[in-house]
Image (cartoon, grey):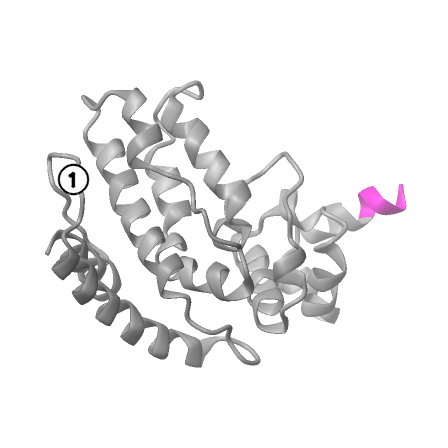
Amino acid sequence: MELTEFISGLINEGNVTVSADLLTFEEADLRTAAIHLQQYYEDDCREMPHTAPDLDMDAALWAAGYLYTIVQFILLRNLDAALLETHLPAYTGERTPAAIYSADLTLRYLPDLFLLAKGLSPTDPLITRFYQTAHQWPFSAAAIPLNEQVDLSAINDHPSLRQAYTDRIIQARNLSQCRLPENLPFVQAALGSHAALLWPQFDTVINEIIL
């Protein structure tokens, strides 16, 4: 029950353990993990603004397994980088609002893992994969500085995701994401007249636009 225990530890204690060997999760483990993710979704969506997207269990399970394996690659540095392609497969479904939110149940911890892996060389294949994942799942990567354009259409089109994403940008003080034309108006509206108090550095973004 490796994946189930991983999800339970992640959600309930904030501590996880992973196997020393790369593995394929058993069907019984996936079924039990799905029960945990279903309960987590039901609890979490109550905290979302507006109405949260539906649960996409395929996306939720993919993300949980993906995060599990990323932790393995961070901790087990003896693993061959060539194994990244086979053991960290990209999500093959459509990134709908439901998929984005469901994957985020575990991918929201990606920024924490990114900080954990920052000691690695910038050219390390795992760091490259981190950035690829962050660009593909920007809702979960609001705290990660990204230098390239990301597709925010599915987030912008869903009121719950849009508001939650804006809140995350503000909470992370992520100026790189704030500067994006798709994000700036929403950040401005959310901060309102309290920008100087909530995010003093936000003025630098406004001054850049004025200049």
**Relative side of 39 to 201, left or right:** left
Q: Position of residue 22 (x, y in %)?
A: 17, 35
In percent of the image, x 58 and y 72: which residue is there? 160
In this view, the residue in front, 168 or 173, is 168
Around disc 1, counting alpha carbons within 10 Å, would you say few (fewer than 14), some (14 to 19), or many (20 or more)?
Answer: few
In percent of the image, x 57 and y 66: which residue is there? 161
Q: Position of residue 35 (x, y in %)?
A: 23, 71
In this view, the residue in front, 190 or 140, is 140
- On screen, 193 above or below 29? below
Count of numbered labels shown in the rendering: 1
User: Can residue 137 be found in the magenta stretch?
Assistant: no
**What is the three-letter code of the residue carrying label 1?**
Leu
User: Can residue 210 be found in the magenta stretch?
Assistant: yes
In this view, the residue in front, 156 or 181, is 156
Q: Which residues are magenta?
A: 207-211
Q: Position of residue 196 (x, y in %)?
A: 69, 61
- On screen, 20 above or below 152? above
Q: Position of residue 108 (x, y in %)?
A: 41, 55
**Relative side of 41 to 188, left or right:** left
In this view, the residue in front, 112 or 138, is 138
In percent of the image, x 25 and y 46: which residue is there? 68
Q: Which residue is mark 1?
A: 23
